[in-house]
Amino acid sequence: MKRLKTAYYGVLGALVALGLATVGYRLVAGMKVTAMTSYVSWGFWVALYIYFIGLSAGSFLLSTMVYVFGMHSLEKVGRAALLSALGALAAGLLFVWVDLGHPYRFWEIFSRPHFTSVMAIESWLYLIYMVLILAELWLLLRDDLVVVARSSRRIAAGLCRVLALGYRPPEDPRQLARTRTREKLWVRILGSIGIPVAIGVHGGTGAIFAVAVARPYWNSGLFPVVFLVSALASGAALVTFLYAAFGKRDGDFLPILRSVAMLTVLFIGLDLLLLVSEVVVGLYSGVPSDVNVFQAMFTGRYWGVFWLGQIGLAGIVPIVIVAAAERRREPAPAQAGGARPVARRVRQTAMWLAGLVALFVIADVWLLAEPVGRAGILAALQVPTRHHAGWWYWIGELVIVIAAAAWLARSWGSPRLWYGAAGLATVAGILAVRLNIVIPGFVVPELSGLRTAYVDPGDFRFSYHYFPSFWELATSVGMIALIVLVFSLLWEWLPLFGSEPARTASPSQG
Amino acid sequence: MVGQHVAEPAPADSPPGERGGGGTEWRPANRRAFLRNLALAAASATAAGVFPRAASAASAAERARAKAVVKATRLRRQYRRQAQESLDESLARQEIGQANAAADATLQAAAAPLGYPLLALGPLTLPQTGQVASQAADPVTEDALARMEADLKRALAKPVEQRRWAMVIDARKCIGCSACTVACKAENKLPPGVVYRPVLVEEVGTFPNVTMRFIPRPCMHCENPPCVKVCPVGATFKRPDGIVAIDYDVCIGCRYCLAACPYQARTFDWGLYYTSGTPELEQYETVPSFEYEELWPREGLRSPIDNARKCHFCLHRLDAGMLPMCVTTCLGRATYFGDQSDPKSLVSELIAQPNAQRLKEELGTDPKVYYLV
């Protein structure tokens, strides 16, 4: 275990070092290290910014279910959800900061805000939101902080002593009870204030896009709602994953895990519903600026981000896995002469394998039927524009993977693993949702002919095509690693799951 | 917040000397620059104590550069004043033809010490301008440029908030030569990747019945600009005369305005150079641009590098009594410019025509650039 932990922090530390070096280079060299263009003016960083803000708002709203709406079955994950809300908020702000052309002027948003801008309003909301989370976390943790501060764990004790801010629980039990009641009330009040703030934080982040009259794809009243629902999905998924991986495995473990996984699926379903509504209305209306965006998303160069990421990872995969895990068959207790369960399992395996092979065959026939033949597969790997061979092959693969996962989830492994996997898939897939919000918004020229209207050596800065540069990717990895590192350390040092000295889980033990 | 840093045109007789040519008033940009210089001075003084040799070399270079900037500003100002005076005189005497020659001579003389040729007022030096202008009383035969110069003069005599600059582009006259695009690049010293006025080309019909349509696209200087609304720091703002301007010293480079503009009239300055990768960065790339009547040398990551940039109707030329560069340079006289609030101006007459149209009017942006189709 100890070695695993060392390896975990070693890798994370290396990534942080590399990432900070690339961030340094970006700050010195300026925005020219990015692959963004004047026409695709927001890219990977902004997608990650809204992604993390969404994770944060989602986690926070989940925590309010405990502290405001009294869903006590989730009590155990409340603090973890709050901490992940804080970590994700920090990550989001880091990404939007590094995306600024003049990062050192960020304070101007606070020193001379221009409140007709949703971005300015949002920046202030982020600030209020951060204070709320910090206050709530402190109130919830302070009793346990004091306990840990007296413990023998050196770093954790020191940190907790500082974070307790000199708080001392009253000695008198009656007074202690009164303090506790007051504390609960305050948490409830802060959480209640936090609900509109968190909705504002993420719905408002959606409004940053939705108010752009120039872009019909963004400019709809549904957009901020889509943001909120996918935020809730990603937040619930993150908590599912974190709890499955690192939560304390006691009697409540499975029921709690199950309920957060169910919540995730509920939000995913709602998100898909909104997506369908958006797409159907857009395509039916046939307005070119809308249709072209959907065309680029569905069959354009990065169709995989939509079909494999948004629909696959953040839609079908978690739904199927959770559904399969729900209908799970626990292995029957060994009976005397228990040949029947084994026979059944063999039969099942054979059936599934046959299905798999059939699917592969169908996919291959499809590929061969294409005039390009085998070259189609190779071309598909390069993800060409509108190459349908690539399409069906990958969609087939996805179906196979999902089917296999569903089958496995019904009999193999522990439910913990599968709920965790569903959560992780959603958390990863929502990134595709975010990318599909930002980048397709830019692919249609506002005036036809702009792409070729002017050409010079800086030509690709007038392009409507975007793929993140090495520096954008490297800085992103580094900054995410940094947040994960800080988050892991806090997870280890802070009494998130109560303050008993013997805790069974830490983030490195996943 | 917004109105505070609206740049008034500098009075012609303001005393020379301070940086930026913003007149005597104490503008935030100047204050910021002052504070920055103060901070730099304090830092260099501290550094001088620690690294005496390095610091002295660095600060000497800095001082020399600052001196050069001040000198160039003074020269610019002087030349502008002279240009203004000579133009005033000429209008008073109604002898535009002769005055142009005089103004031109003054200009070239004033520009000589600057070390690079002045493209300003190009068409005024054309001989026929003088001839046509001498019959200035006849609005039919009068050259459009001469008339617009006079319109401009009248507009500049009014207070800034009573002007409403507008541009009219005659799509029937445009031959798609892109001279305006290039002249604009040269006037504003635009780096690669930045363009203020591209010319959109549209092919109409099928072979062999094909024709081309050209749509030059400057900034529309909307009455209700989506870009201004979304700027989180108010770095981009609508001036009282209708020009949508950017305060480079405030812009944080978030590129929200780029996403919000329905005409994609904004580009980002990525800090590129045409001659990077060659043995020497050519001087014409690092020479400061004179946008918004301030000097913007290109070095390091100084603004306007990593800022949003856009057409500003050549504000610096307007305030010196000159038409925007694209108007002056247009071969076919297809671009008109003037004060829309003046009913006697050429643009007002053209805008009143039934064939005047605007781009994407349905968005309610109320553009100030009209197309005659």
Image (cartoon, rainbow, N blue to C red):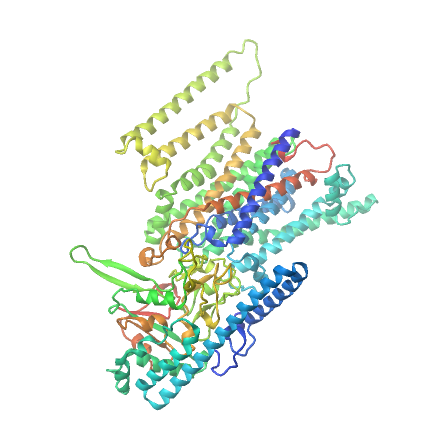
Q: Position of residue B351 (x, y in %)?
A: 31, 74
- Work out which residue is located at the far bottom of the displayed protein and give it: B93
- Work out which residue is located at the far front of the displayed protein and give it: B53
Residue located at (61% from left, 43% from top): A84
Against B10, is A310 above or below? above
Q: Quadrant of the C terminus of chain B?
A: bottom left
Q: Judge left or right: residue B286 versus residue A280.
A: right
Where on the picture, by quarter, is residue A55? Answer: top right
Against B158, is B295 above or below? above
Q: Judge left or right: residue B230 versus residue A94.
A: left
Residue located at (33% from left, 52% from top): A285
Where on the picture, by quarter, is residue B64? Answer: bottom right
Q: Judge left or right: residue A94 versus residue A156.
A: left
- Work out which residue is located at the far right of the displayed protein and give it: A172
- Tally the numbered discs: 0
Residue located at (51% from left, 71% from top): B68
- Work out which residue is located at the far top of the displayed protein and give it: A337
Residue B309 visible? The answer is: yes
Q: Position of residue B63 (x, y in %)?
A: 57, 68
Question: Looking at the image, which is closer to me, B361 or A458?
Answer: A458
